[in-house]
Image (spheres, rainbow, N blue to C red):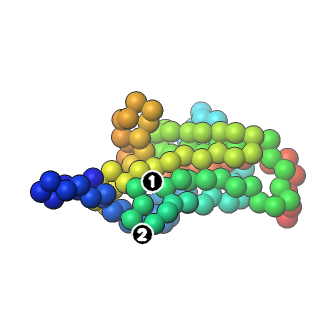
Amino acid sequence: MIIRGRQKFPACCPVITTAISARVRPLPRTTGVGLDECSILHHSSRGVCPQFVQLVYSRSRGTAISQVVIQIVSGIILVANNMGPMVAMLTIECVALRRWMYRDTQQKEFEFTGVSCNQGTLTSGD
C-alpha cells in the first residue's frame, strides 16, 4: 500500500514472469523430490495492478497423476508448499512497490526466488 497524504493506493508490482517466479527443482528432503516436473504452471490475476496472484498447477490433458506439489522457495529455504491429488496453488501478494512476497497464515511476509511444481505421473498423454 502506498500512502500519499491521507489517501492509500494499492502498490503496483511488475507482471509475473519467469524472472520473478523462476521454476526451480524441489528442495532436498521435501515432498516434491522424486516426482516429475509439472506439465503446466500458470499465474492467475485480475486487473492492471493486481494485489494478489495465484500460482496454480494444472495437469495436462491425458495425464493421470497421483499428486501434485507446489513450493515457493527462497534459495535453499522452503517458504511455502501446498499439495493435492489434482490441484495445488499458492497465492503471492504485492506488498510494496515492485515487490511480490508470500504471506503466511500468521501474516508474516517472505521473499522468494523461485517456484517448484512437481507431480506423481501415473500415465502421460505424450
List the residue tagged with mark 1.
52
Q: Mark 1 packing: few (<14 Cα in 10 Å), some, or many (20+)?
A: some
Is there any visible trace of residue 112 in the rendered image? no
Quadrant of the drawing holding the C terminus: bottom right
Find residue 110 and report its image quarter: top left
Res 114 visible: yes
Q: Position of residue 29 (x, y in %)?
A: 59, 33
Up-down relation of residue 104 to residue 5 (above or below): above
Q: CA distance from mark 2 to mark 1?
A: 11 Å
Instruction: Give SS at disc 2.
Output: loop
Residue drawn at (81%, 61%) of the image: 61
Residue with the most extreme top position: 106
Left or right of 103? Residue 26 is right
Q: Quadrant of residue 38?
A: bottom right
| Amino acid type assigned to the residue bearing label 1 in the image | Phe
- What residue is shown at x 54% (from left), y 46% (from top)? 90
Would you name the residue on which mark 2 appears?
Answer: 48
User: Horizontally, is 81 left or right of 124 in the view?
Assistant: left
Q: Classify mark 1: helix, strand or loop.
A: strand
Residue type at numbered disc 2: Val
**Count of numbered badges drawn on the protein:** 2
> Callout 2: 10 Å neighbours few (<14), some, many (20+)?
few
The image's mark for residue 119 is none
Residue in the picture at 27% in, 53% down: 1
Q: Is residue 118 left or right of residue 54?
A: right
Residue at (43, 45) in percent of width and height: 102
In the displayed orientation, state which residue is furthest to the left. Answer: 5
Is residue 18 left or right of 38 when viewed as pictured? left
Residue 46 percent location from the top left of the image = 49, 63
Q: Position of residue 30 (x, y in %)?
A: 60, 35
